Image (tube, helix red, strand yellow):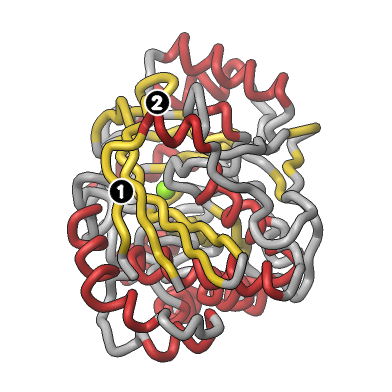
């Protein structure tokens, strides 16, 4: 088994602003496994800074190099990998990068497309929504119209404390009936419940992660006050926490980012928990390249994922992606590729253009 990694710096098409800051170019780490003529890939979803979650590129790479690579030497099944890597606490993003590598590898061995390999109930396509960063309101309104014209099935806007009404009111004035949601990325605290009540009049499908990044208790209190359903994103880091969150009524919707929950195996478990609790689930993203994106689209192509996700086609974020095939969206639907595994591989000439480092891990 040969395991390589590539570090790349890919320019973003346009700056993407959330309550964490603005991204201009993306530091990407890709893994490539070679064994018996099969080539598998995965992408680490951490970024340079530990602002979205506790891991960053440096910490995750350390965990992979010094702990996880040993565990994948014999190419265990992803389920087995989940079990044997459990002694390492947390570090879900690092674990997910190795778990997804194994999923791509094993679905290629089984000669099945990943979306069929992982989903008990494959639907065969992902419903696409769009997530819009914070911008001047006229720019946002224009972007919403363009997104609707392109067929996106749900519009999500990022909001910041104090700016919620000035963002949402003009949107609702211009677009009274569109499926709209708002993502606060934990910008509010328990002192802001009164402010958050103002959001109810905008008839959102859900309000995403208003409070602390690791909280479910305060969210359950807020859920009792708001008529807007709460969607948890950052707080859902494991199937156990998802179970607890539904149990105490902290959310009715979950945003599953496969990379944040340790991979696709846990993503499936969380989607089942949402469904068993009459909740809803969708698949989020972390501005991945076509490698990471293909795992998200495979996961989003399950019947259990009943809400549109943040699963745009490739050209949305990067002027040039690093893969040889690009996803297309038609009428708000993105189909995974019907070839074994993730169905994409690295485009060598683009790789050379953006590569800043490469190395062998095993
Ligand atoms: Mg979010």
Check disc 2: other Cα within 10 Å, few if <14, some if 14-19, many if 20+: some
- What's the distance in space between the residues labelled 2 and 1, CA to CA? 21 Å
Q: Farthest residue in the top direction?
A: 138
Q: Nearer the viewer, residue 247 or 343?
A: 343
x, y percent for residue 229: 53, 55
Residue 99 seen from this side: yes
Which corner quadrant of the image does residue 328 belong to?
top right
The one nearer the camera, 10 or 153, is 10
Q: Is residue 234 left or right of residue 78?
A: left
Residue 261 in view of the camera: no
Task: Find the residue positioned furthest to the front.
Answer: 36
Element carrying mark 1: strand
Q: Which mark is residue 12?
A: 2
Where is mark 1, residue-wise?
358
Residue name at image x 50 percent, y 81 percent: 75
In the picture, the disc for residue 304 is none
Residue 89 placed where, x, y %?
25, 81
Q: Quadrant of the C terminus?
A: bottom left
Vertical arrangement, residue 260 with respect to residue 9, above or below: below
Q: Residue at x 55, y 12 (%)?
A: 142
Give how far across and how far down residue 159 sits, in percent. 37, 34
Q: Earlier in the sequence, mark 2 or mark 1?
A: 2
Give the camera-side residue of 76 and 58.
76
């Amino acid at each position: 088994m040969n395991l390589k990694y590539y570090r790349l710096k890919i320019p973003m098409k346009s700056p993407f602003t959330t309550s964490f800051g603005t991204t201009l170019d993306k530091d990407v780490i890709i893994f490539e496994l070679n064994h018996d003529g099969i080539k598998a890939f995965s992408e680490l979803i951490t970024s340079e800074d530990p602002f979205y979650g506790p891991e960053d590129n440096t910490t995750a790479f350390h965990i992979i190099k010094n702990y996880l690579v040993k565990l994948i030497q014999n190419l265990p099944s992803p389920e087995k990998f989940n079990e044997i890597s459990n002694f390492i606490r947390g570090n879900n993003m690092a674990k997910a990068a190795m778990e997804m590598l194994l999923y791509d590898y094993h679905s290629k061995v089984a000669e099945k497309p990943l979306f069929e390999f992982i989903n008990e109930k494959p639907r065969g396509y992902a419903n696409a929504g769009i997530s819009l960063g914070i911008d001047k309101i006229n720019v946002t309104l224009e972007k919403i119209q363009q997104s609707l014209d392109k067929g996106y099935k749900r519009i999500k806007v990022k909001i910041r404390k104090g700016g919620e009404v000035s963002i949402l009111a003009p949107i609702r004035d211009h677009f009274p009936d569109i499926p709209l949601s708002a993502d606060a990325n934990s910008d509010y605290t328990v002192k802001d419940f009164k402010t958050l009540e103002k959001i109810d009049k905008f008839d959102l499908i859900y309000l995403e992660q208003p409070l602390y990044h690791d909280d479910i208790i305060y969210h359950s209190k807020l859920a009792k006050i708001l008529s807007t359903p709460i969607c948890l994103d950052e707080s859902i880091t494991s199937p156990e926490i998802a179970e607890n969150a539904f149990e105490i009524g902290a959310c009715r919707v979950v945003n599953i980012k496969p990379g944040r929950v340790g991979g696709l195996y846990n993503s499936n478990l969380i989607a089942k928990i949402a469904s068993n609790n009459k909740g809803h689930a969708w698949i989020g993203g972390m501005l991945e390249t076509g490698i990471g994106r293909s795992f998200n689209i495979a996961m989003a192509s399950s019947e259990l994922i009943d809400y549109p996700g943040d699963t745009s086609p490739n050209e949305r974020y990067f002027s040039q992606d690093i893969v040889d095939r690009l996803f297309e969206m038609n009428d708000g639907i993105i189909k995974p590729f019907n070839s074994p595994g993730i169905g994409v591989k690295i485009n060598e000439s683009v790789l050379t253009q953006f590569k800043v480092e490469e190395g062998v891990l095993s």
